[in-house]
Image: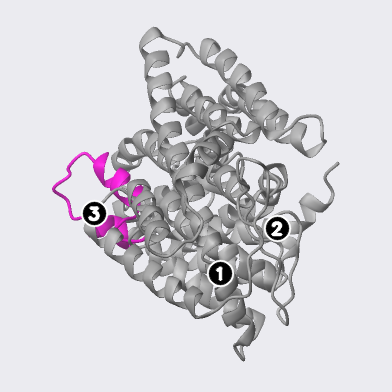
Amino acid sequence: MGVLPGARGHRGRLSGTPEYQTPQSKGGRAYDASPPNSHSAMALTVTAALLLVLLVSGIPVAIGLAILALVLDAALSSRPLWPAMGPLTWTSSTNFIFVAVPVFILMGEILMRGGLTNHLYQAVSLWVKKIPGGLLHSNIVASAIFAAVAGSSVATAATIGSVALPELRRRRYNERLVLGTLAAGGTLGILIPPSVTMVVYGLLTETSIGRLFIAGIVPGLLTALLYMVVVAFIGWRWPALAPRDPSPIRLSDLAVRTGLVLPVIALIVAVLGSMYMGFATPTEAAAVGVVGAMILAVAYRGATKRNLVEVCTATMKTTGFVLLLVVMAMYLTFVLGSLQLPETLVTFVTQLEMSRLGVLLIIIGVYLVLGTVMSVFEMMVVTIPVVIPIILALDYDPVWFGIIIVKVAEIALITPPIGLVLYVLHGIRYDRSLPMSDVYIGALPFLVVDLIVIALLIAFPEIALWLPSTMK
C-alpha cells in the first residue's frame, strides 16, 4: 500500500519541511519530491477548483476522485498514473489489514440481525430507569454497547432507534429529546471500537489500527458519560420531558436480563482485549468476533436463512463502497505526490506566523464545514492525503489526530444537511410527515458535548494516548 507523507514514523518539525514519500511504483522505487515551486502552487489551485466542481456536480465521490486524479495527471504531472494504477489497486485491495474492514462489518451485521437488540435494550433500561432522565439513558448506554460490536453509527442508530422509539413514545417522552439521544448514541458507533472509520483512517495513513482502537475507548466512554450528564440535567430540570418509570425493579428480572447480555460483553472484551494484550492483530480479533457473533446469533435464534442472506449482502455492499473509495484515494495520492502538493502545503504552513494550535483549529474548522456536505468516508479520503503531512510537520501524534478526526466525523453525522444519522432516525419515525427539524433540535445539546470533548482532547491528549501507551 502507498505510503502517505510521514506515515511511517517521520515526524517533521514546524521549522522545516518533512521528508515526503509518494506511493511506490511497481518496482518498489520511492520517488523523491523536489522542493516546491510555482508549478506546485498552480497545481494546488487547480486541484481545489476541480474538487469543488466535482463535489457540487453530484458525481459520486469515488468517481470524482478518479476523474480528478486522471485530469491532474494528464494536465500537470510528469509521472504517468496509468502504469501505476494496477499496482496501486492491487496493493490497496490486498493489504492484510484491509481484511479487517469486511470482517468487522460482518460481525456487526450478524449481531444487528441476530436478536441482540431487544435483550440489550431491556437489560440496560432496568439499570438506568431510576436516574433523572429515565429511559433516555438507555438510548445512550445501549448505543455505546452496541457500538462496540457494530462499528457503524448508522447501524447503531437504526437498530437501537427501532427498539427505543415505540417504547418511549408509549411512555410519553418528549420526542425531540428521544431523537436527540438516539442521534448522539448512534455517533458512538464510529468512536467506540471496533470502528470501520478508524480502519480506513489507519489504512490511509498506515497508522496502527490496534492503537487507534484502544485510543478510542476512553474518549468514547467520556463522550457517553457527558451525554448522560446532559440527559440527567434535563430530566432533573424539566421532569415532564422524561418521566421516570414508577414501577419497582425486581432483582429476578434484573438478573435474567443482565445474564442475556453478558455474552455480548464477553465478546467485546475478547475482541478488544486480544488486541490490547498483543495476542491478536485487528484482523485476527475481527475473525474471533465473527465466530462469537455467529454463536450468539444462534443462541438468540436470529441465525435464520433470510437474516444470513441479508448479512452477506449488506457486508458486500459496504465493503465494496469502502474499498472503491480507498483505491481512488490511492490514485489521487499518487498524483498529488508527483505534483508536490503536500510539500507545498507544508511549506506554506511553516511560513505562517501562526501557532501549532492555530493551524490545528483551522484544520478542525475546515472538517466541521466539510462534514455538513460530505459523508464521513468521503471527507476522509479527500482530505487525508494533504492534511496528514501538515499534522506530522506540526509534530502531532497521528493516533491522537485520528481520534480528533473521528470526533469531528461524529459531528458531521448529526449536522444538517447531510447528517446520515439524522435521516436514518427520521426515516424510522411512525409518521414521516412530522418535521425534520425535530431531529435537528433534539441533537443540538449533544453537538455542544462533542465540541467540549474535542476541546478536552486538544488540551489533554493523554485522554486518547494513555491507554495505547500501556498496550503490550
Q: Is residue 458 magenta?
A: no
User: Element type at marker 1?
Assistant: helix
Q: Position of residue 193 (x, y in %)?
A: 61, 42
Reply above or below: 151 against 365: above
Q: Earlier in the sequence, mark 2 or mark 3?
A: 3
Q: Which residue lies under the disc numbered 2?
A: 464
Q: Amino acid at mark 1?
A: Ile
Q: Can residue 249 be spotted in the picture? A: no
User: Element type at marker 2?
Assistant: helix
Q: Amino acid at mark 2?
A: Ala
Circles 2 and 1: CB distance less than 8 Å?
no
Query: Residue 281 lies in what quarter of the image?
Result: top right
Cα gap from disc 3 to disc 1, whole angstroms = 33 Å
Q: Nearer the viewer, residue 123 or 432?
A: 432
Q: Is residue 427 magenta?
A: yes
Circles 2 and 3: CB distance less than 8 Å?
no
Q: Position of residue 320 (x, y in %)?
A: 42, 32
Q: Residue farthest to the bottom? A: 353
Q: Which residue lies under the disc numbered 3?
A: 58
At horizontal 30% and vertical 48% (from top left) the residue drawn is 60
User: Are there few (<14), some (14-19), or many (20+) residues within 10 Å of tag 3?
Assistant: few
What segment is highlighted magenta in the picture? 415-441
Q: Position of residue 329 (x, y in %)?
A: 48, 50
At horizontal 21% and vertical 39% (from top left) the residue drawn is 430
- Horizontal placement of 112 versus 299: left or right? left
Q: Earlier in the sequence, mark 2 or mark 1?
A: 1
- Horizontal placement of 290 versus 186: left or right? right
Q: How many marks?
A: 3
Q: Which residue lies under the disc numbered 1?
A: 452
Q: Position of residue 209 (x, y in %)?
A: 67, 43
Between circles 2 and 3, the one closer to the viewer is: 3
Reply above or below: 31 against 89: below
